[in-house]
Image (cartoon, rainbow, N blue to C red):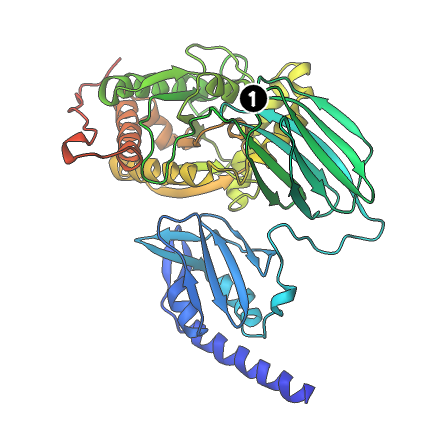
Amino acid sequence: MNRVLTLIVALLVAVAGTAAAGLPMVTVDGQPYVELTRLAGTLQGSVDAAPSSVRAYLHASGHVVTLTRNWSQLLLDGRPVVLEAPVRVRQASWLVPQSFMTRLVPRLTAPGPAPSALPEAAAAPTPARGGITLEELRLRSYPSFTRVVIETSAPVRHRVDPSGPKEARVMLLSLAASPRAEELHDGFVDTVRLERAGPHAMVRILFEGAPGPLRTSTLADPPRLVVDVIRPEASTPDRSGSASPLRTIVLDAGHGGHDPGAQGPTGLQEKDLVLDVTRRVARLVQERLELKVKLSRDGDYFVPLRDRTTFANKERADLFVSIHANAHREAVNEGVETYFLSSEATDTAARHVAALENSVVQLESPASRGKMDIVKSILWDLAQSQFQLESSRLAETVQDSMTQSLRIPSRGVKQAGFYVLGGAAMPAVLLEIGFVTNPREEKKLSESRYRDEIARAILEGLAEYKRNTEPRPSVSAHPRIAPVSRTPQQ
């Protein structure tokens, strides 16, 4: 009987693989993709998704695949699988890379787990021998919430217990941890205590005044539980279609001072180029979009990476845009690309760019270098935060505007672990406006007229994003951009 069942499963796999192989391909950023709905049809499954959603769900043969927009990591029945390219959404269709068929289709045609075996939202795999231990407890304050992160040696089950008038409690099942307390005093949360509770551990969040509701999520690599405590008085914008108007944007010119950044064949320095372009963008945004613009640096001086987003948080900015120029050992590389934050780089090239930009930490003071692990921990904690979807949309909009306006090759929207984006409590992107190491691009980037074109392209992208996110009570209320003079600015 087992041999017969095995043969049937093998036949189903072969049939599904053959059917999937015949699906039409779509090329995105040089990678072959397949439409998710077409693939679901060949598997006799269904798709639960919308073009504007953060996630999509594929149901087939009792399995559930959870896909996240612009992410290469997905979940198969709650377990992570990393593909060689991210999931994309183009022209209202969800697309999966070709490797999805070779890596996932065989599993999807096998019988799925029994309903009782499917992972729950707070469930975790059986812990490794020796039990689950606490790796780190860390806190961080944001304008509208306080974040508590419990990093553990393996995924841990949790539950939110009934709370008192000035505290909230989260039980961590089968977690071995010594009691500890972390004082915060951020005007909302007073102290976070970790206590023993029999074979379990309990996190007690003590408030200075009225408590706030909890929002919990579990993240992998490394395993951690993220608890966001929402401030009762916080008026966090609803960016799902009825968002509050954008008011403030922080523009961040990369590098500066003793950190020149990349340098071109004839001596063009990234720090000077991006400061000039950033100032031009700021002038246009203030004039045409009537937004309040703040610069993380407005001169040739050095600003540590973490201080840039800390500044944006203090200003309660609605957007954070970091402007850089690219570099590569191969001088023929060209084009523009836009990044948003992720713990997983889209590809090797994206990982290289992030490593290059993150190396700035080595130029900071010894005290700042000592905070490098803290910066990294912030990166991990925000990698799947509430701002991911908006950062992705902002990146796509600005990238499209730059490539269309500048008529320059598009290197796509990518993800990587940029420290400079890690602490931003708002949608945040990093723009690479060209390669200073490419002699032809360096020549163009040195010209005032071309810098104006870059600034206008970024402006158009920001304006498009503004149109798509702000309330629209009437057609006449759409933000319009007055004609921009084509006269180059000196």
In the image, residue 383 above or below residue 108: above
Q: Amino acid at mark 1?
A: Arg
Q: Quadrant of the N terminus?
A: bottom right
In the image, 32: left or right of 408?
right
In the image, residue 172 above or below residue 465: below
Residue 292: give x, y in percent of width and height. 33, 17
Residue 147: give x, y in percent of width and height. 59, 30
- Front residue (pair 314, 297): 314
Q: Residue furthest right?
A: 130
Task: Classify residue 381 by image quadrant.
Answer: top right
Q: Residue furthest front?
A: 165
Task: Classify residue 33 by image quadrant.
Answer: bottom left
Residue 382: give x, y in percent of width and height. 55, 35
Residue 35 can be seen, yes or no: no
In the image, residue 285 above or below residue 228: above
Residue 197 can be seen, yes or no: yes
Task: Classify residue 96 by image quadrant.
Answer: bottom left
Instruction: Name the residue: 51% across, 56% down.
Output: 66
Residue highlighted by disc 1: 306
- Front residue (pair 298, 73): 73
Q: Quadrant of the C terminus?
A: top left
- Front residue (pair 407, 200): 200
